[in-house]
Image (cartoon, coloured by chain):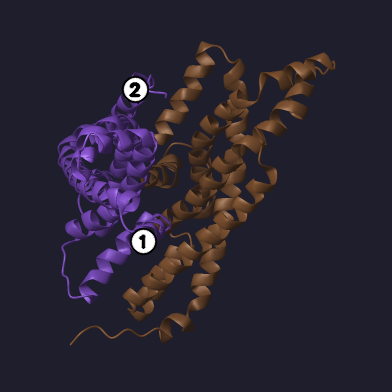
Chain colours: A brown, B purple
């Protein structure tokens, strides 16, 4: 006799999944916002930095990119509080980790985006008498944002998927919701099937929306 | 410091499992990915659509959820796999979906004329792939694929959540005994870094070396 599928318990506890999905999106959104800030500041700094600055930025980028996210999550949540005297909750710890993680990927994205701004545009800005800061804010950054939009949306989707790792430190996002329902009802196949569908559908809905946005702001070359 | 010294034999055992998992996953996903990758380029339309649908679906699932899905879902289908092989299966499925994309990108970057040239000198399809397309495509395939190998090594840390004693799990076990999380997590991070950084550096070197191919 095989396993009998039964979804009634899943729908009865669906609020754990829907609430978890919202929290997952929230974690991904906050992390990409902070990560983009980190990435942007470091990318601008990198362009003008000396050797030491560049080495430091590269060290940060390479370290984060070559270590599993799971280990970084443990490191920040369990490791760091033993050395520094700050208390933070699991969600805060996870957002901090994911932001640092996103920042490392976005530095590279923004750096190549800054490089891709046509030199003629900067020269035009100079010819109009804009100061270096004005050129950065009014010419370079807006153009760079449009160039990097596709990479940004890909990063956002992968961050959304990475939020599933928050379940290991008991942040009640979607995967944790699935584990919670499983512990209560033992309907494990059903709950992971529903969870998978939720991740895939949400991911592709977001991706579709972002692709429309990209088309709207595409740089004609 | 004592904790670090004490941990070394355990971490090395774990590291062995991490490398073993990564190697199996990388080898299997390479074979499956290349076959399906060729299928998605040259196969008949229904096959192409099927591979695209399944591949895109898999790439949309968080790897952690896929691991749980395989681990808990397989027994319901009547397949009883150990946690080690469930984890390896899940990671292989996930990696294969990525390898398909690397293959597709690499092969499609080869100009159409190459295939036609192969046809005109009378090579059959298999010979054209083997002697014309693959030798050129492999240079475009290697750098992204090597980067993907680092993803496999990083992804293998998730097998610890199924109780497989890989490097990640070994670290947590030692921490459970010594109560010194920070130095051990840093040591673990350095071990992962050493493996992955060498792989991604090799990837960059290869990319630079092959960058002359720009038709």
Task: Report x, y in % for residue B210.
Answer: 34, 22
| Kind of element beneath mark 2 | loop
Asked if residue B185 lies left or right of residue A96, the reply is left
| Kind of element beneath mark 1 | helix
Determine if residue A66 is in view.
Answer: no
Q: Quadrant of residue B3?
A: top left
Using the image as rendered, state which of residue B29 and residue B192 is in the foreground. Answer: B29
Crowding around mark 2 (Cα neighbors within 10 Å: few <14, some 14 to 19, many 20+) is some
Crowding around mark 1 (Cα neighbors within 10 Å: few <14, some 14 to 19, many 20+) is few
Q: Quadrant of residue B6?
A: top left
Using the image as rendered, state which of residue B26 and residue A63 is in the foreground. Answer: B26
Asked if residue A142 lies left or right of residue A177, the reply is right
Which residue is found at the position 47% from the left and 49% from the top? A158
A199 up-or-down from B197: above or below: below
Taking the view exactly as shown, the residue that stands out farthest to the top is A51
Task: Report x, y in % for residue A45.
Answer: 61, 22
Task: Report x, y in % for residue A65.
Answer: 41, 35
Q: Earlier in the sequence, mark 1 or mark 2?
A: 1
Per the image, the residue denoted by label 2 is B210
Per the image, the residue denoted by label 1 is B54
Which residue is found at the position 32% from the left and 74% from the top? A189
Q: Quadrant of residue A10?
A: bottom left
Where's the C terminus of chain B, which quadrant?
Answer: top left
A133 up-or-down from B56: above or below: above
Which residue is found at the position 30% from the left and 33% from the top? B117
């Amino acid at each position: 006799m095989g396993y009998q599928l039964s979804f009634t318990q899943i729908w009865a506890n669906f609020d754990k999944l829907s609430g978890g999905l919202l929290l997952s999106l929230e974690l991904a959104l906050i992390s990409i916002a902070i990560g983009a800030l980190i990435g942007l500041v470091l990318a601008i700094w990198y362009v003008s930095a000396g050797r030491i600055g560049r080495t430091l930025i590269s060290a940060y980028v390479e370290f984060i990119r070559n270590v599993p996210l799971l280990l970084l999550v443990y490191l920040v949540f369990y490791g760091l509080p033993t050395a520094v005297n700050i208390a933070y909750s699991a969600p805060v710890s996870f957002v901090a980790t994911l932001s640092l993680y996103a920042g490392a990927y976005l530095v590279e994205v923004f750096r190549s985006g800054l490089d891709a701004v046509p030199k003629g545009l900067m020269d035009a800005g100079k010819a109009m008498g804009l100061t270096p800061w004005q050129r950065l804010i009014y010419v370079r950054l807006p153009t760079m944002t449009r160039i990097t939009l596709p990479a940004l949306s890909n990063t956002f989707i992968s961050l959304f998927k990475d939020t599933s790792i928050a379940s290991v430190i008991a942040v009640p996002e979607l995967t944790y919701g699935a584990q919670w329902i499983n512990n209560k009802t033992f309907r494990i196949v059903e709950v992971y099937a529903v969870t998978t569908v939720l991740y895939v559908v949400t991911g592709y809905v977001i991706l579709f929306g972002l692709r429309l946005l990209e088309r709207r702001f595409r740089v004609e070359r | 410091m004592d904790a670090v010294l004490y941990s070394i034999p355990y971490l090395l055992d774990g590291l062995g499992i991490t490398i073993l998992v990564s190697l199996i996953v990388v080898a299997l996903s390479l074979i499956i990915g290349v076959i399906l990758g060729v299928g998605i380029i040259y196969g008949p339309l229904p096959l192409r659509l099927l591979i695209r649908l399944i591949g895109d679906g898999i790439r949309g699932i968080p790897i952690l959820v896929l691991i749980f899905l395989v681990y808990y879902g397989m027994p319901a289908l009547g397949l009883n796999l150990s946690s080690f092989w469930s984890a390896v299966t899940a990671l292989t499925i996930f990696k294969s979906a990525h390898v398909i994309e690397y293959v597709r990108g690499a092969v499609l970057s080869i100009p159409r004329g190459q295939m036609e040239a192969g046809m005109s000198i009378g090579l059959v399809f298999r010979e054209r792939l083997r002697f014309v397309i693959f030798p050129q495509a492999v240079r475009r395939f290697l750098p992204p694929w090597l980067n993907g190998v680092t993803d496999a090594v990083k992804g293998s840390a998730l097998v610890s959540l199924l109780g497989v004693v890989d490097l990640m799990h070994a670290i947590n076990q030692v921490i459970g005994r010594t109560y010194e999380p920070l130095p051990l997590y840093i040591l673990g991070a350095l071990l992962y870094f050493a493996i992955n950084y060498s792989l991604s550096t090799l990837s960059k070197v290869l990319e630079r070396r092959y960058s002359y191919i720009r038709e």
